[in-house]
Amino acid sequence: MTGGIKVINEGKGGVIMQKLGNATAKAALGRATWKLLHTMTLRYPESPTQDERDALSAYFHLSSRLYPCGECAAEFQELLRKYPPQTSSRRNAALWLCMLHNQVNERLGKPEFDCAHLDDEYDCGCGDAPIKKVEDASSGGDVGAGGDKADPMDMEEEDLGALVRGG
């Protein structure tokens, strides 16, 4: 047990649900799930505690077992094995999930989502600071607020490999 959250063995436990045969229900479930997950990562703490990191990771792993679409859950489990949840910050969690969402979009033949527009697409109106305005630790200024600083959402400059390797 770490900080009140029982850390699950992330390599154990298969899919619980059966195949979801209704294509309309499957599509609606997918849209609702992505909305929930993106909103959750965009509201996640900028500097999470270990307990919060464990909770987010456990949530993704348990969701991959309990998701109502069995074949979708199996794919999600495979993606989690290949790209473990990134929980070190709001930005890393949001960009990791966007990358995962784009992996699914590619498999389904859907267009890639521009991760620079996460705040616009999934704004819950909750008053949280947008991901584009996270503090730049090296300069103390707002990143993405104009000026000479690099846009943190510019995936051309981002080392996405570092985001998917554990941190």
Image (cartoon, helix red, strand yellow):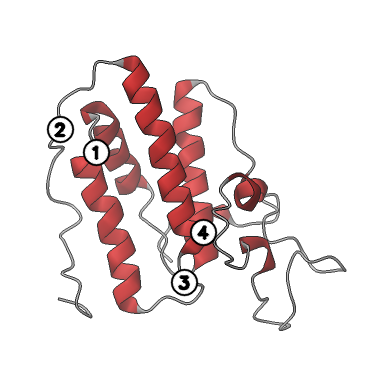
Q: Mark 4 Cα within 10 Å, few/some/many (few <14, many 20+)?
A: many
Q: Which residue in the protein does label 1 denote?
A: 67
| N-terminal-most mark, 2 or 3 | 2
| N-terminal-most mark, 1 or 4 | 4
Depicted 138 relative to depicted 53: above or below? below
Q: Is residue 110 visible?
A: yes
Q: Secondary structure at mark 3?
A: loop
Q: Amino acid at mark 4?
A: Leu
Q: CA distance from mark 2 to mark 3?
A: 31 Å
Q: Residue at image x 28%, y 16%? A: 22
Q: Secondary structure at mark 2?
A: loop
| N-terminal-most mark, 1 or 2 | 2
Q: Which residue in the protein does label 4 denote?
A: 42
Quadrant that contains the N terminus: bottom left
Q: Which mark is residue 17?
A: 2
Q: Which mark is residue 45?
A: 3
The image quadrant that residue 34 belongs to is top left
| N-terminal-most mark, 4 or 2 | 2
